[in-house]
Amino acid sequence: MTDRHTIHSQLEHLQSKYIGTGHADTTKWEWLVNQHRDSYCSYMGHFDLLNYFAIAENESKARVRFNLMEKMLQPCGPPADKPEEN
């Protein structure tokens, strides 16, 4: 019984500390936004991968980094309308 409580409290701590871990009420759109933003951050953080994208797109590294940062604002478009609760 204590193991279950410990694991549950550790999971709650992770979910409150890191946004990307999600929780029971995470929508599909929120999860996809987290995935896309994590991917874009990873691309910008790995210098060789950023060089690869710059060569493939025939753009400068600064332009590729700028484009990735622009995509991070709304990577999956605006959120879907939530149904009203009465």
Image (cartoon, grey):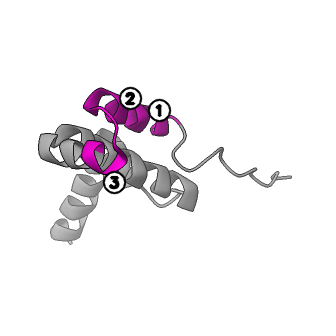
Residue 4 appears in the figure: yes
In the depicted structure, whether residue 4 falls above or below residue 48: below
- Count all numbered tags in the image, as a single digit: 3
The reply to whether dot 2 and dot 1 touch (C-beta < 8 Å) is yes
Pointer 3: what residue? 21
Q: Which of marks 2 and 3 is nearer the N terminus?
A: 3
Magenta region: 54-73
The image quarter in which residue 61 lies: top left
User: Where residue 35 sits: x, y (%)?
Assistant: 39, 54
Q: Residues within 10 Å of mark 1 (few under 14, many from 20)?
A: few
Q: State the residue at coordinates (82%, 51%).
A: 84
Prevailing secondary structure class for the magenta stretch in the rendered image? helix
Residue 15 appears in the figure: no
Label 2 sits on what residue type?
A: Phe
The image quarter in which residue 54 lies: top left
Q: How crowded is mark 3: few (under 14 residues within 10 Å), some or many (20 or more)?
A: some
Q: State the residue at coordinates (81%, 53%).
A: 85
- Which residue is more in the foreground, 28 or 18? 28
Regarding mark 1 in the picture, which secondary structure is present there? helix
Label 3 sits on what residue type?
A: Thr
Query: Which of the labelled discs sits on residue 66, or is there none?
Result: 2
Q: State the residue at coordinates (17%, 66%).
A: 2
